[in-house]
Image: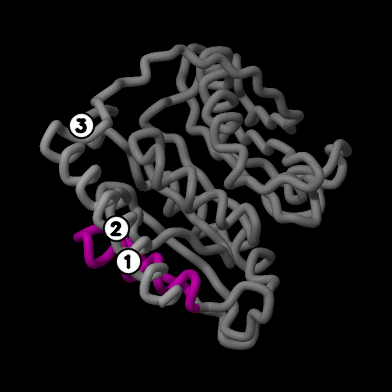
Amino acid sequence: MRAGRLICVIAAVALGCIGAWGERTAMGANQSEKKLNKQVTKTVQCDYLLYLPPGYGEKEQKWPLMVFLHGAGERGDNLELVKKHGPPKLVEQGRDFPFIIVSPQCPRGIWWTEKLDTLVALLDEIQSKYAVDTDRVYLTGLSMGGFGTWSLACRHPQRFAAVAPICGGGQWFLANRLRDVPVWAFHGARDRVVPLDQSKSMVEAVKRAGGDAKLTVYPESQHDSWTATYDNPKLYEWFLSHRRNKESK
């Protein structure tokens, strides 16, 4: 008997809840449409190396700009670390380039993919203070900087004339945004830190979107696919062959 009464009570409570829900649905859901409209301000900062090419400032002319993003091992607050690889290393060795080169440093424990606002602000700063040809802005980076290159280019494709990510990867579903930005990616076939498939998936996604993308694979290279890449003059010739606004001179 007690069990029967308990079942009746539970059934009555359930029916009451269902009835209340039905009445509430009939009156309309208890939610309304709203919109957030709020101004958010943010202060960003970073240290960086700046290279000005021979002849800069001698006459009125605009110069191409190359942005270089270092790897995870060069993070911190010591800019000497940024000179370990890539264009900053070559500049330190005495090599001249026909570019303005800006090489920011990422703080320790942070990833370039978390610093996109900072990189955009730095790009704005350099373009406002120096004689930059905004139709010839190029982006490159290695390892963590390769991921940063893919990420920054996918989110701000209109800022770059060409990009060269090295042993990096990204979000392939955003790669269609690069259909108007030439891409030359590089990767070592034996890379155990960042698998080759990371570059392959991004390049293939750009191609599917109708973009101009190519991948150079070093068959015997492991993670260090950047030394051979940055030592190759053809990379810089390839950069300079591209303009964002092809009608301008």
Task: List the single residue furthest toward the front.
Answer: 1
Above or below: residue 154 compared with residue 51 = below
Identify which residue is drawn at 40% across, 65% down: 202
Is 13 one of the magenta-colored residues?
no
Question: x, y (%) of residue 170?
Answer: 48, 60
Q: Is residue 98 visible?
A: no
Q: Which residue is mark 3?
A: 247
- Quarter where residue 21 is shown: top left
Residue at 24% in and 43% down: 20
Q: Which label belongs to residue 12? A: 2
Q: Secondary structure at mark 1?
A: helix
Q: Position of residue 204 (x, y in %)?
A: 33, 70
Q: Nearest to the eye among marks 3 and 2: give it.
A: 2
Residue drawn at x 68%, y 38% is 103
Rendered location of residue 85, percent (x, y)? 75, 55
Instruction: Report the residue marked by disc 1.
Output: 8
Crowding at dot 2, Cα within 10 Å, few <14 / some 14-19 / many 20+, comes out as: few
| Left or right, residue 118 beside residue 107 | left
